Image (cartoon, rainbow, N blue to C red):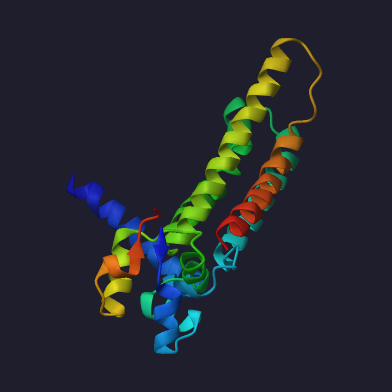
Amino acid sequence: MNNRVRELRGEHGWSQADLAGRLDVSRQTVNAIETGKYDPSLPLAFKIARLFAQPIESIFTPDE
Amino acid sequence: MRDDRTWLDGLNDWLLRTGARAFAGRAAHAADPQRRMTRGEVCVLLGYLAALLASRAGLPCVAAPWARALLALLPLPPIVLLVALAVRRVSGMDELQRRIELVVLAVTAAAAWLGFSVAWLLAEAGVALPSPLLGFWGMPLLYVFARRWAGRRYA
């Protein structure tokens, strides 16, 4: 799964810790999502989409 | 049914209060995933070691079977409490930390099962076995190695 979390976080000027705090997860989780080592659960993916005010499919896209 | 619920609620409240005091809560775990053991877990672990020593020291002095059984099982309550606290800690983690912890527990359990199976098969064949203490110390070591492996895999 590819995602634009790092790009969107950068646009908001947030650090990984800032984003982790807003999502109520650890910084390690944010890092793992951004590097593609971990695909978030559906509730967390929706939380991310809501936070960035974007549709979920514009943030997360399946591997071709 | 009602009594069961009350008893379970009481246990849950106690775990919550213990968790709140000793573990600094769910947020702390999310903010500090590197924290391995809580103060409460360390206390229970020390209690377990004390119970183990007391059990070992007391067994040669007791002859009655019921008393020997009681002494032999003395370390069991701290183990049960430790498991309950570990479950509480894992359930308070965020989803990635929980996943890592469950993978680590699965790897440790599978390896321990394999080790005990090998030991049992060798024992059935009459082959000399290493001390059971190897398993006692091997499992925590295995947990530590599995934890590092899983941490690196997702970090």
Residue B39 % position (x, y): 58, 68
Residue B89 % position (x, y): 47, 60
Name of the residue lying farthest toward the bottom: A13
Residue B109 % position (x, y): 57, 38
Picture layout, residue B138 above or below residue B154: above
Asked whether residue B75 is in view, the answer is yes
Closest to the observer, B126 or B10:
B126
Asked whether residue B81 is in view, the answer is no
Closest to the observer, B32 or B134:
B32
Residue B36 % position (x, y): 60, 63
Q: Which picture quadrant has residue A53? A: bottom left
Name of the residue lying farthest toward the left: B2
Q: Which picture quadrant has residue B63? A: top right
Closest to the observer, A10 or B38:
A10
Q: Which picture quadrant has residue A56? A: bottom left
Q: Quadrant of the N terminus of chain B?
A: top left
Picture layout, residue B37 above or below residue B70: below
Number of labelled discs?
0
Q: At 40% across and 72% down in the image, what residue appears? A: A4
Q: Quadrant of the C terminus of chain B?
A: bottom right
Q: At 75% across and 33% down in the image, what residue appears? A: B60
Closest to the observer, B133 or B9:
B133
